[in-house]
Amino acid sequence: MQSCATKPCLYDTAFTKEYCRGPARPMKILIINWRDIEHPEGGGAEVHLHEIFSRLVRRGHQVTLLTTAFRGAEREKEIGGLKILRWGHTFTFNWEAPFLARRILARQAVDCIVDDVNKIPFFSPRWFHSVPTCVFFHHLFGNTIFELTVWPCAAYVLMLERLSGWGYRNVPCCTVSKSTADELVGCGFDRSRIVVIENSVDTDRYRPSSAVSKESGMLLYAGRIKSYKNVEIALDALKSLLSKGRRDLRLVISGTGDHEPALKAYAGRLGLENRVRFLGYTEEERQIDLYRRATIFVNTSLKEGWGITNIEAGACGTAVVANNAPGLRDSVKDGETGLLYSENNQAHLEECIERLLDDESLRKKFELNGRKWALHFSWDRSAERVEEWLMGVVGKK
């Protein structure tokens, strides 16, 4: 699974021979991100970074990642061809990053700086004027940040997000969905400078299997367990559906996070101990098996940049029911690859689940279409588009 529930070594995936021929003029790229793929709290943004830029390394580009340290980590390491410098501290990295980046620039030439924003923006264009800069935005927290931390910290993050339009004025910007692009425009970004390049999935690994059968009544949630993921609504829906006589229903929760103890306690208060399984951290192969076995994949998040788990589930031939929220409405084609329930509406969530349980032909349609939809999203193709965009940024196209 290409989210926080698992930590696959995605930089070892295969590359097409055609893609690996390489560019005419390689670039030297410096990326700034809070985390790398080995960080315990790393997630979809870090997977995206390594999937894209490990491919660019294979194409002949040189990539350095400036990021934060974590307990037990090597200060400097190479992963998938990326040179990783873990020099920063978690809570002060946005202030340290400009000074640490200057140390890097003093000892090596750089063609462009990429702010890979997954938490607080770094505003590199305000610090560096002699090197072309650009920015990746995976998502904006908006008011959901108040679900994740105490209000002074949440207000601080929200303030910096609102300043992003000023901090990255006239700077090329890449994001992963139309929803996030719209939010960026709302923060003051110039729409003409925003390019959308969606996250992708390895459809050779994430695919249906004739050797695996669907398990009747199995609902699956996969991803981090955070308060803004709103998994409680799935528990409430399960409780209600069981009371209506849907006795074979159960929910499997794959992944972990700081909200897991509270969610387990909530399941206990609802009397669902025997109907909900918490699997914790899940290895990628097991996650793929879960996708294949599930009757319905349920995504209840209040907000995402893209919603890659919807694509992963579809790639494995599983119908999706998701919240009609930013990011999720981009990765699910309502009525084609799955169903979107009215934002945070439990009754509509139950209705969508029941509809798919009762209508096998509709469910089969979503299973087939989900696979076809997932095939549109190739990491090779996404990396090629990012490379083209970056070469335009540095004027080498």
Image (cartoon, rainbow, N blue to C red):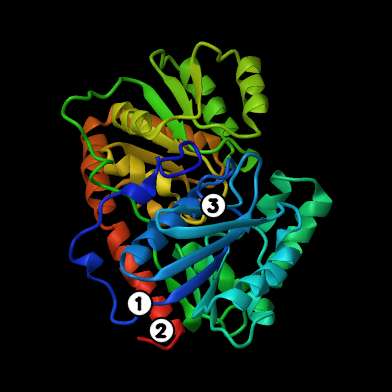
State the residue at coordinates (70%, 45%): 148
Labels 2 and 3: the sequence-earlier one: 3
Inspect the image, locate mark 1, and give the three-letter code of the amino acid beneath it.
Glu
Q: Residues within 10 Å of mark 2 (few under 14, many from 20)?
A: few
Q: Does residue 158 show up? A: yes
Residue carrying label 2: 392
Q: Is label 1 in contact with label 2 (beta carbons under 8 Å)?
A: yes
x then y, percent, for residue 120? 67, 61
Residue that carries the numbered disc 1 in the rendered image: 388
Where residue 250 sits, quadrant-wise, is: top left
- Judged left or right of residue 171, residue 52 is left
The x and y percentages for residue 24 are 28, 81
Quadrant in which the C terminus appears: bottom left
Q: Is residue 237 left or right of residue 380?
A: right
Q: Residue at x 65, y 34 (%)?
A: 258
In the displayed structure, 38 sits above or below 357; it is below
Q: CA distance from mark 1 to mark 3?
A: 23 Å
Q: Is residue 118 above or below residue 136?
A: above
Instruction: Give residue 349's position: percent from left, percent from top.
Output: 47, 36
- Depth check, front residue: 217 or 9: 9
Q: In the rendering, which numbered label is found on residue 338?
A: none
Residue annotated with mark 3: 36
Q: Distance of mark 1 from mark 2, alpha carbons?
A: 6 Å
Q: Amino acid at mark 3?
A: Asp
Q: Secondary structure at mark 1?
A: helix
